[in-house]
Amino acid sequence: MPSAPAIPPLPTSIRALTVAPGVPGSMRLDVRAEPAGGGALLARTLAVGICGTDVEIMEGRYGWPPPDCERIVIGHESLARVVDVAGAHDWAVGDLVVGIVRRPDPLPCACCAAGEWDMCRNGGYTERGIKALDGFAAEWIRLEPAFAVKLDPRLAEVGVLLEPASVVAKAWDHVHRISQRSRSWKPRRALVTGAGPVGLLAALLGQQRGLEMHVFDRATSGRKPELVRALGAQYHAEPLEDLRALRPDVVIECTGAASVMLEVLEYSAAGGIVCLAGMSSGGHSLELDLGLINRRMVLENDVVFGSVNANRFHYELAAQALAQADISWLAGLICRRPPLSRWTEAFERRPDDVKVVLDMEA
């Protein structure tokens, strides 16, 4: 009988990217004695994606440290390889794993108790790398099996996209649930505003659903238009006004820009569904005829809803979507992979960037 794979010895020092939430410029590469987090699964981190939330935490505008701590390990978009299962069923050494970000309120609220912690109603949830729990930007991490998602081995280079894909998997799932209000409503055309990683993944999932996909972004050349066209979708650059005649049945708004949100509310087809998946920074004033918008939405049976985060069901939907996608197309979303030792490069904004990923093994 073959012996179990040997567990590689943990190093005496583990590099981790940490920050003091609320303190601008406090991010640094630290050395820790233990893997970040807790749980039966021990994993070697392969990659960590960087997104706008991480930038806000670095700038001191967001984030909460764990109890009795001044600093938090950041990183909520993860990809790791399991090195010890500690008796956890359904897991094996060598499995690719992604950690679920949010944990339910310990009380819990009704949604958290039902496994829908993404819909937490009292704000008592915690989030790895964001709110009161160390994240995944450490060379070694631990995960609870209940909050770990196994990936197809073919996704070893692109599995770090699972977390942002889970966000749009939830958005599309809720679009589908809302569409059940009518037995005859069948969407044909969809518009995604914003060609960042979330927008492009939203377009991918729409294309997999057989919809005629359109994507709007400000970029007129480069990686974003190329990725949209390679997907078989139609790319549109400014002015947004040119899309008024498109009349999409579904809009997934991923920019968070107030002016874009206002316009897409007017552009959907009668009975349309608009999902607001982008987060606005606030502070922008626009003239808004709320009465006119109300009249149109009521008379046309329109729906507008907001969506953020994801629960396990959506992570699993996203894992299926990535496994069905063209791996080379997914790889095109990842534009740079700076090593952990040069982590500052991951926070630089470059013109043709889509998704920047920290290489945790380099």
Image (tube, grey):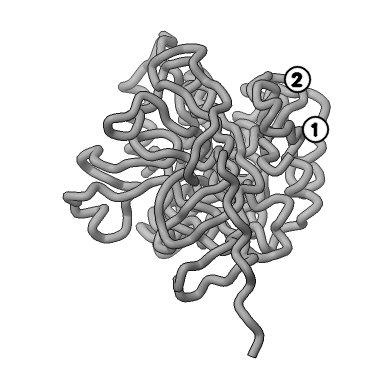
> Considering the image in quadrants, where does the N terminus appear?
bottom right
- Residue 23 vertical placement versus 312 (above, below): above
- Give left or right: position of 43 versus 334: left
Image spot of residue 202 (x, y percent): 59, 45
- Give left or right: position of 29 versus 167: right
Image spot of residue 246 (x, y percent): 63, 37
Q: Choose top left, top right, bottom left or bottom right for residue 357.
A: top right
Q: Amino acid at mark 2?
A: Pro
**Residue 105 shows up from this direction:** yes
Image spot of residue 228 (x, y percent): 75, 41
**Residue 249 shows up from this direction:** no
Q: Secondary structure at mark 1?
A: helix
Q: Residue at x 65, y 44 (%)?
A: 47
Q: Which residue is mark 1?
A: 223
Distance in Å between CA atoms under marks 2 and 1: 10 Å
Q: Residue at x 57, y 71 (%)?
A: 92
Q: Residue at x 47, y 12 (%)?
A: 24
Tell me, for residue 351, which label it has, or none: 2
Q: Tell me whether the residue at label 2 lies in contact with that at label 1, contact meaning CB atoms closer than 8 angstroms.
A: no
Q: Residue at x 23, y 58 (%)?
A: 113
Q: Name the N-terminal-most of marks 2 and 1.
A: 1
Q: Choose top left, top right, bottom left or bottom right for residue 362.
A: top right
- Residue 273 vertical placement versus 184 (above, below): above
Q: Amino acid at mark 1?
A: Arg
